[in-house]
Image: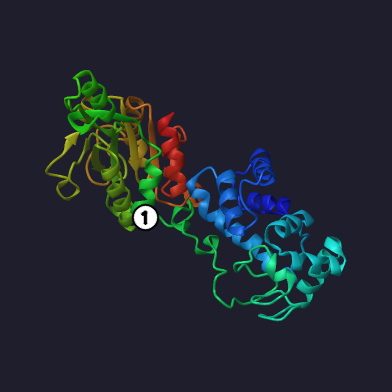
Amino acid sequence: MLEGFLIELRDAKLPVSLKEFLTLMEAMKRGVASWRVDDFYYLARAALVKDEKHLDKFDRVFGHYFKGIETLADSPMAIPAEWLKRLGEKLLTEEEKRQIEAMGGWEKLMETLQQRLAEQKERHQGGNKWIGTEGTSPYGAYGYNPEGVRIGQEESRHHRALKVWDKREFKNLDDRVELGTRNVKLALRRLRQFAREGAALELDLDDTIRSTARNAGWLDLKLLPERHNAVKVLLLLDIGGSMDGHIRTCAELFSAASSEFKHLEYFYFHNCPYEALWPDARRRRTEEVPTAEILRTYDQSYRLIFVGDASMSPYEIAEPGASVEHFNDEAGEVWLRRLAGAYPKAVWLNPVPERYWDGTHSIGMIRQIMNDRMYPLTLEGLDRAMRKLTR
């Protein structure tokens, strides 16, 4: 039965290895979790899921696959006799065990259980035959979850079959869902290098204890700077024109980056960076900062992140004087190569869906200039980009 579970996980693109699956089987063999489905869910999730972004996919596969236990008549599957035997040892009374023996033993029990699962189509409670609740049938005593997991019923009497995997508490962590500030923050956290900087404001408990002990018991407080993400980010954002349709996405990215990175510097450009950038998009022609000055001010310890759709006339990249807003002495490609060369760790985030990139010549040109370090502005793309910046 569990082999099919592994296959469904892989079909859903979860990176579950055979070694991890064998670890789960060994944990089950050693009784790490009880035979309740809830306990098995937590054990399986701990053994098979390596990244929080896969939690929702796991929940959906788990709910779909083990729903087959509830509708076994529609999807036959083998129920391990060992499960029934172990459950019987833990849950059945002596009287119920005698009932099993009267039916012909465990093998006969398995056969009868399969027959009744195939026959039962509606909810049932009470009685001494059908699988259900409040009855005296031995099946009700040693089902997969005597506390409410249904077998062979289409409805719940106490509404207790809504399990944690059906609630899908982790659906907003899925790397395929729509961007949002919280989700962007989770992706940006890949880019972290912690260091203690600034004024000493945080209590150093270990050093305080050692110092107090050396001071014959007189309290000697020791403080240290707070721990911050020491990564430095230079964020360059394309604004105006075709980027107007991506304002919300870029705003969410900017908001998340502002809260995640203590050392964040940002500037704006239009279509392609040229000899000047703007610290304020609303005053972009009155407050310009020369790009050469930015290159001198921020050293290569900064990670450079471009954000733009890279959709423009190819001449704006390749030719001097082709900017749509001013006459540029040098081509956009020249400045792009200077920036990419000054910051070895640089990526380009593109809000245009990746499937459309091949249809725009300018996107291909910028991808080439960036040495193919262009990523879609999705959670999955952000994750790949942040991994690239940490290498």
* Among the 4 quarters of the image, the one containing residue 195: top left
The residue lying toward the viewer, choosing from 8 and 244, is 8
Which residue is outermost to the front?
A: 94
Residue to which mark 1 is pinned: 180
Name the residue: 18% across, 29% down.
200
* Among the 4 quarters of the image, the one containing residue 332: top left
Q: Position of residue 8 (x, y in %)?
A: 66, 54
The quarter of the image holding the N terminus is bottom right
Q: Position of residue 145 (x, y in %)?
A: 63, 64
Name the residue: 71% across, 63% down.
92
Q: Is residue 299 above or below residue 153?
A: above
| Residue 359 is at least partly visible in this image | no
Which colour assignment does the render follow?
Answer: rainbow
Which residue is outermost to the top?
A: 214
CA neighbours of label 1 inside 10 A, class few (<14), some (14 to 19), many (20+):
some
Tell me the amino acid under the disc marked 1: Gly
* Among the 4 quarters of the image, the one containing residue 110: bottom right
Name the residue: 65% across, 52% down.
11
